[in-house]
Structures are given as C-alpha cells and as structure tokens.
Image (spheres, rainbow, N blue to C red):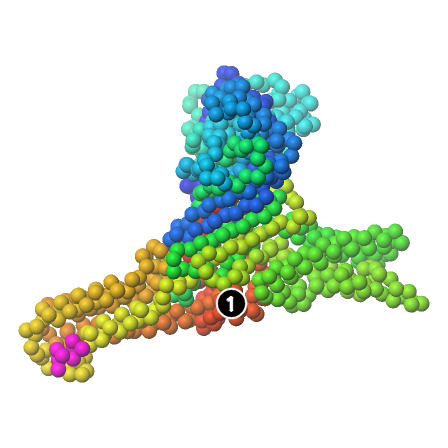
Amino acid sequence: MSLELPRVTPSGEPMTGIDSLREAVRAVPIPGAPPRLSRDGAAVGLAFLDMVLRQNYVRRLTERLTLIDHQSARCTTEVDISLSLLDDGQREAARLYQRLRRRGRTGDLGGWPADPVSTQTGDVLWVPVSKVPRRSHSPIDIISGTGAKLPRLTQYETSRLMASALYRLFKVILNTHPKARTESSSLYEFLFLADKQRWLLQAALVALLTERGKPTTPSALPASTPGTVHGEGARLRKAVLAILDDYGEDLREYVTLVNVAVNDTLLVVALDADKDEHLLSFDSPLDVVEVPDRHSLRGSLRRAGGTYWAAYHTSLPASLRAYHLVAETEPGIEINTMYLTSDADATIVTALAEDLSTVADRRESEASEPGGRSGRKLLELELQTCLRRLSDLMRRRRWEASQAMFVLEEEHELPMASKLAWAVMSGEAVERDGGELRNSLVLHPLVTADRLRQAAAEIDTQGLQYDLNLENDPARARAHVYWRRDPSRVDVDRTISVSAGMFLRDTSGSRLASVSVYVAGVSGISYILGCLLFGSLFPFIGRSATGNLFYADALIAVLLLVPGFLYARLKLPPPHSIGGQLRSLPRLVAHLTITCAALLAATIAASRNAVFIRAALAVCVLVPILSAVLTWIIARAVKDNLLLLDKRLPRWAVAGIRRMGARRTVQSQKAGWLMSFAFVRELFDRPDATFRNSSAAS
C-alpha cells in the first residue's frame, strides 16, 4: 500500500531533479567565466533547505480543505511558528540574509539591489514557511495573524540562493571521497584542475533554478556532423556527466535536495524577530489527480448509493509536531465520515520486523547451543527491548481503534504479536525447581523463535506502520481530523505521507423522492390524456381510430409545457456540484421523462395513425416509471460503507470497522446486496475526486 503519488511529466514519465540537471549540462553554453555564486549565499541557501525540510520551528500545521464542486477544491494552509524553536545555526542564517540585504551586496542577492524596506532599524528574520511547486505560477500571498501581507523573497532570489547552496554542497560531498586526493583520478581533476568543468556545472545549476521553465523530457540531440570529431566542448560535458554518474552512490542525499530545489520554490518571509509567536496563512495550490473514468456510468451508479467519496494526499516533515486537516463542504452537503492515515511509523515497523527476525535466529541458536550466562543475558536484553517496542506499537493501534469506536481484536488479526506483547507486559514469571521465580523472557513459554518470526510477518501484512485517525463527531458541513507526532519519534531525515478520505452525503432533501413524484406526475398526465384521446381506461391497445383530434394543438402544448414547468420546480443542483453528482441518476431519469413526453407530442403532431400514437403513449407512461423503479433498486443495491473500499485504509482496522459497521461513524445504513460480490466492490473502489497538495509531489 503506497500513499505517494509521483509527479508526472507531459510525456507521462517522471523526470527527477538530477535528470533535469543532466539535461541542463547538455544544453547550456559553456561559460568563459564562473557564474556569480557566493559562499554566504550558499550558507543561507543550505540553512533554508534544512529549515523547510525539518520545520522544527512549526508548532502546528493546519490545512483547510474546502470542497467547492466536483473535482474542485481550495486549500488554505495555516502555520503556527515559534521563533524560539529555531536552533542557533538556523537563526544565524536568517539574520545573515538580512545583513546581506542591508549591505546591498548584489552578488549575494542574485544580482538584485538591496530591498529598501530592509534598511529599517527593526530586527527581521527571514524564515521559509513552506514550499510550492515551480509549475504553479499563481501569486501566493502570506497573511499574518493580524491580516497584513508579509514581504517574501521572489522566486529568482531564492533560486540564486539554492544554486549557490547546491554547488557548494556538491563540492563538499565529493571532497570527502578518497579519490579526491588521488591526482590521477577524474574527480581530482574536476575539483582542483578543470575550471571550465566546474563553471559548466555552476551555469547548469543557475539556468535550471533561476529560469522560469525547466526540462520535462530529455531533448533529442542531433547526430554528429559528418567530417567532425568530439572537441573541447564535448569533452567537458562528458566529463561533468561522468562525475554525476560515477559518484551517484555518494550523492544519494544530494539528489533528494536537488529534487526539492528543482521542482519546488521556497516561500521565505520576513518575520519580526522581537515577536516569538507568528500565525501565518496562505492558499496552497492543489493538483487534481485525474481519474480516467470519472465521467463514466460506473461513478454515477456508485453515487446512487448516496455517498460522494473525496480523497486528499499530502506529505509532511517527520519532525512536525501536530497537523490538523479541516474539510468544509457546500450548503446542503455534510461530511458523514472522515479519516486520516499516515506512514509515520514506517521506519519503526521496518526496523522492528528486522529485529524480530534477528532475535528469532538468536533464540533458536540459544536453544540448540547455549551460549552461557552472558549469552542468555544478552538475549534477554534484546528480547526485552524488541518486545517492549512491539507492545508499545500495538498499544497505540489499540487506542486509535478505541478512539474510532471499534475494537482491535488482536487475537484474530495479530495472534502471535499479541501473545508476545502479553509476555513482556504481563509480568509473568516462570517457576523453576525449588520454587525459584525467574522473570525471564528467554524462559517464557510464549516467546519462541517461530512466534517471533510470525509476529514480524503479522505487523507487516496487517500494515501496523499506518496509523488511523477517524472523525467521530456528528455529521455536518465541517469536519476535521487531528494527527500528532509521538514525542519519542523524531526522524528529521524523511517525510511522511498522509492520506485522508472524506465521505459526503446530500442533506438538502431526498435525492429520489422528488424525482419519483415528478415521474409519477408526468406519466399520470400522459395517461389521462391518452384515456381522453381514445375514450378508454386502457388506451394502449385497440385498433379503433384515434377519434377527434381537433384539439391536437392543445394536447401538444400540455405535453411540452407541463413537464418543463414541473422540472423547473425540482431545483436540482448544478451538474458539476457535489450535490449534482449525487443526483446524476435522478437527473438522468428526469431528462428521460421530458424526452418521452416530447416524443409523444411529436407523434401526435406528425401522425394520425393510432398504432404510432399508442406506442408513443406506452413509452411516455411506462419508460419513466420503469427507469425510476430501476434507480430505486440500484440505490439500494450499491449502498455500502465506502470506508471499507478504500485501499489506503490500514489493514489492521478493516476487520474491526466491518464488525462495528452499524455504528454511526461508518454509516448507519445497511449495505446493498449487490456489494456482497467482490468483483462489484472492485468496480467502485475509486474516489470521485482525488486532490493532492502540490508540495507533496516532491
């Protein structure tokens, strides 16, 4: 189960930042002098990158997702910043950039003059608050808690800082390689001898980061010109590309930073250093993940069950302390269920599974070949450490299930892991000969090598690396979920993927009742007109003439005007709204009813043949009624708890939610009979709308 969605280029293939750098090396002209990059700018740029990735100064991050229409939403991000949480290096970098602006050193500012505002006496700290994708060119205004717009660096200014930072970091990393001191190596030549090679790399970084566009697909290079050989320029480009390829293993972390710098722009704002707490807000760009069949009949059939399914994905720094996701909907639509899951414990579960397997091997070896007192003591300590981590992990999942109002039955989903957790937490001792009590996990009958291995497999297959936060407040037009990092879990070198699901329902009125009344009214009027026209209570059969048709114009007027007048009173939501999507099938039935009435009117106007008129009358009366009945059947047949269809729901939670399906948090209605078939559920397992925070793509 993956929570990440890759950025896709127009060609359909993802292109990483390091691939874009290679393309820039092939494309930019070889400079005759080094580009203007500064050491101070590099220090500031590296500090800004570190700050935006760690966000250790962010006390709380809140995202407000407003679902406007189908496949349309707006995201407002609120950042609660405490400047007292900045470490000394970050604070010094924030002050250093302000000093550079005050001195007007244009080389450090990317060629731009000093900001006149920065010459004031007030102390200012430049702090990055977030990152946004470069492909989004919409203006982003950062608003303070008082409603004032804050000054922030331009994309060009931050790009110059990033270019300086990435080049300096590239040199520092390669300087630590053993071949950097070998004079015969190509790395030594690049670092200390070949100036033009370094200038080419600098020019490539500057062009890639400072220009508005960036390569999305590799360029098709022309073939070599006949009668020529590779000269100095070709040799320089080949040498730089060879450095990037040959030392790729040493540049793995560097590649991650290049991806951020190339694909995203940092939002760096000026904050008053005399004020510790700052509350900032800005509109975050959203990507709509296109679903190939979002307009197909399958989506309309599933929505006939009365639920609209929206999904949201983002990524957060693992060091973030707290995260709120607030969802709001249009009037008449309320959120029935909302959940959030993240892979914050992915590194913990991966390490725990490996440790359980390793300890199982040691437990098996100790049973076959005892290692003496010291070996048993070492194994005891390893078991205590490993099983306590397992017990704590299961305790968190158990409490999350309780908060979501269902029970995690560990003896069914995690039988071996629950036994091992009980062994370490129960305090049970083993009685030896002579009545001696030994509180040892090595001697505990539940702690065996097979159970340790099976527990390692269970926590992986049940997806215990994914937490769960389920909204359990009454359904309404505004709902929220809350995530908080455990203080013991700090992974500053990674990000966590977050996925949320929202299940909405229409509360503006019955989706089918009003359309059913409309169908009954139009069909009834058509039937009465047929009875009057043919002088019979069953006008659908008979071979007699149609009778007196002197009032055909009046009949036609009634069939054309009355259905349209009644349709206007239905007040159906616009088709592109969420309410309109939930009423797509009833809308289709209403349109079919109007079409049948128009068909009957056209038949009366064009023909005096009783057979044709009776056939049109039968269609006008029976087809709308049958379509309305079929819509009722479909709505009851496909009604289901969509939360259980979400593949991103942690596997450990699925069984418990299914057992507690009658609770309000997972919808109170009974599932439709059609959803009892697995192949039918697989047809409906895609959300109606999937949104992704653009910064999550990097």
Name the spot of residue 505 as percent of width and height, x first: 42, 62
Q: Is residue 486 left or right of residue 540?
A: right
Q: Residue at x 58, y 29 (%)?
A: 94
Name the spot of residue 454 as percent of width and height, x first: 70, 61
One can see residue 154 in this view:
yes
Residue at mark 1:
664
Q: Is residue 543 left or right of residue 253?
A: left
Q: Residue at x 61, y 31 (%)?
A: 91
Name the spot of residue 43 as percent of width and height, x first: 60, 27
- Classify mark 1: helix, strand or loop: helix
Q: Is residue 651 left or right of residue 538?
A: right
User: Over which residues does the magenta segment extend?
Assistant: 528-535
479 vs 266, nearest the viewer: 479
95 vs 451, nearest the viewer: 95
Q: Quadrant of the N terminus?
A: bottom right
Q: Residue at x 42, y 71 (%)?
A: 637
